[in-house]
Amino acid sequence: MTWRLAVVLLISTLSACDGSRREPEAPASRREQDSTLGASKLPGAQGVSGAMKVADSAAARRAREDSASAGAP
């Protein structure tokens, strides 16, 4: 029995170390994390989605104000 367990552990260890080099994935940005959380069914998720919409609206408004003030003499 222990011999079979040792063989299974050896095979699983060797299969996990296949020798290929993979680039590490870039961590998710705060926006991506919030978007994932907002799309979930967790309590408070709708609040996260609402806050993101408000932040987007504020950013769009600031962009409009900046472009308007940049064009004014």
Image (tube, rainbow, N blue to C red):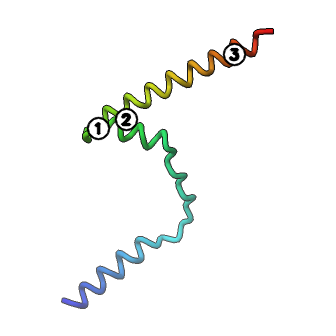
Disc 1 versus disc 2: distance between alpha carbons? 7 Å
| Residue contact between numbered discs 3 and 1, judged by CB atoms under 8 Å | no
At 71% from the left edge and 14% from the top edge, which residue is drawn?
69
At 25% from the left edge and 90% from the top edge, which residue is drawn?
3
- Residue lying farthest to the left in this orientation: 1
Disc 2 versus disc 3: distance between alpha carbons? 29 Å
- Quarter location, residue 61: top right
16 vs 72: above or below: below
Mark 2 and mark 3 lie on one chain; the one further toward the N terminus is 2
Label 3, secondary structure: give it. helix
50 vs 3: above or below: above
At 29% from the left edge and 86% from the top edge, which residue is drawn?
6
Q: Position of residue 20 (x, y in %)?
A: 54, 66
Mark 3, other Cα within 10 Å: few <14 / some 14–19 / many ≥20: few
19 vs 9: above or below: above
| Residue contact between numbered discs 1 and 2, judged by CB atoms under 8 Å | yes
- Quarter location, residue 39: top left
Residue 48, numbered label:
2
Label 1, secondary structure: give it. loop
Mark 3 and mark 1 lie on one chain; the one further toward the N terminus is 1
Mark 2, other Cα within 10 Å: few <14 / some 14–19 / many ≥20: some
- Residue lying farthest to the right in this orientation: 73
Q: Position of residue 57 (x, y in %)?
A: 50, 21
Please, what is the three-letter code of the amino acid marked with disc 2?
Answer: Val
Please, what is the three-letter code of the amino acid marked with disc 3?
Answer: Ser
Please, what is the three-letter code of the amino acid marked with disc 1?
Answer: Gly
Which residue matches tag 3? 67
Q: Quadrant of the C terminus?
A: top right
Residue 15, numbered label:
none
At 76% from the left edge and 9% from the top edge, which residue is drawn?
72
1 vs 33: above or below: below
Which residue matches tag 1? 44
